[in-house]
Image (cartoon, rainbow, N blue to C red):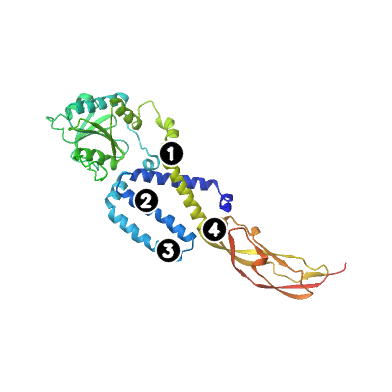
Amino acid sequence: MKELLISFRWQDILDILIITLVFYRLYLWLHGKRALRMIIAILALPFCYLVAQWLDLPLTVWGFKNLWAIILFVVIVIFQQEIRAALASITLPSFLLGRSEREQLTSSHLDHIVEAAYKLGERRIGGLIVLQRGDDLDEFIHGKTRVDSEISEGLLISIFNPVSPLHDGAVIIHGGRIQYATALLPVSQSTTLPKDWGTRHRAGVGITEVSDAECLIISEERGEVLFAHLGHAKKTLTKEDLKRRLSQLSSLPKEKPWKKEWYLQLLDELPKKLVFLLLVCILWVFVVGIRQGEMTYDIPIEYYSVPQHLGMTGDPPREINVRLRGSQRFLSSLTPEQVRVRVDLSGAHAGNNQVALSEHEMSAPSGITITHFYPRRINVQLSQASRK
């Protein structure tokens, strides 16, 4: 561990932060979906594999290596619909940053939407109002009727009026305008939703599962207004509560929320983020510390304790070939000067001396082992030193 900390680089900090961000965004994206528990189990397997390597359990390591292909095949078969929907809707900026291009909704627009939703609830008229953000909804909605009108409270109420030919389906709002009516939304198949929710509620949640849109669900039976986002729907208590939620997610002109909110967003769900950071740090220690490698060096020989009355003659061996094994991180930063081969000639005599080498004459940094070296014997020629 000490050697790992010594060799810690700024690139490692960046590496850890990137993987932490990816893991956290994956968690947010999968939260509430039936695939989450399966994904968590799969992500736990690399930790088990690294622990098995660390404990030197060859049979367990072999089992994990051969299970990966089967596990991936099973996941693709079971969750093929979720994977298809995810690849169709997700973009790299929205996945990593949690935001995409924001539609231009004014505060006045939000007032019209909120007032219309609550008046529909008071009159016990059901409805679905979808606020499209960055993701394109065309491939998820069907049966839509193009409206392309300005947002107004009266128009929204009249659309959902039971006698209106446009009342059946959802209204799609994008770019500060009512784009479509009578849109049919994908129905959520989540098992976590209340069992008494009907098709309207499940459709309102479903569109937020496959995209970054928000949806207002107006209940015909209970007169409630629910706000759905990222696959979750919550009842709004007041008009101010609903507008506050919409304002947090919809950009308003002359404002740049990303400049004001990015540091506050770091504190959102801070305990969960710290847990992911800790897990990634543990993974980094295992990966960097356990990932073994080998490297070969030609190491110079240092002769010492040569008797005073003798001198070296001829061409004595100057280096030996050494194979080192250890962490790939340590090996990549290792220099030949850090591995030393010192030969003690205090017991040598005049003439030819055959010296047997062993690991005792060699030194390497902590965490690095010498697995092989050649030659194992060297010949050193000594002769009487000149008195001059």
Q: Which mark is residue 258?
A: none
Circle 2 Cα neighbour tier, 10 Å, few/some/many (<14 / 14–19 / ≥20): few
Circle 3 Cα neighbour tier, 10 Å, few/some/many (<14 / 14–19 / ≥20): some
Q: Of callouts 4 and 1, which one flags the residue occurring earlier in the amino acid sequence?
A: 1
Q: Nearer the viewer, mark 4 or mark 1?
A: 1
The image position of residue 225, as x and y in percent, is: 24, 31
The image position of residue 324, as x and y in percent, is: 58, 63
Q: CA distance from mark 2 to mark 4?
A: 28 Å
Disc 2 marks a residue whose amino acid type is: Ile
Q: Name the residue tied to disc 3.
A: 60
Disc 4 marks a residue whose amino acid type is: Ser
Q: Name the residue tied to disc 4.
A: 327
Q: Is residue 25 left or right of residue 324?
A: left
The image position of residue 290, as x and y in percent, is: 51, 58
Q: Are the residues at dot 1 and dot 3 in contact (C-beta closer than 8 Å)? A: no
Disc 3 marks a residue whose amino acid type is: Thr
Residue 131 in sight here: no
Along the line of sight, which residue is nearer the eye, 383 or 276? 276
Q: Which mark is residue 40?
A: 2
Q: CA distance from mark 3 to mark 2?
A: 20 Å
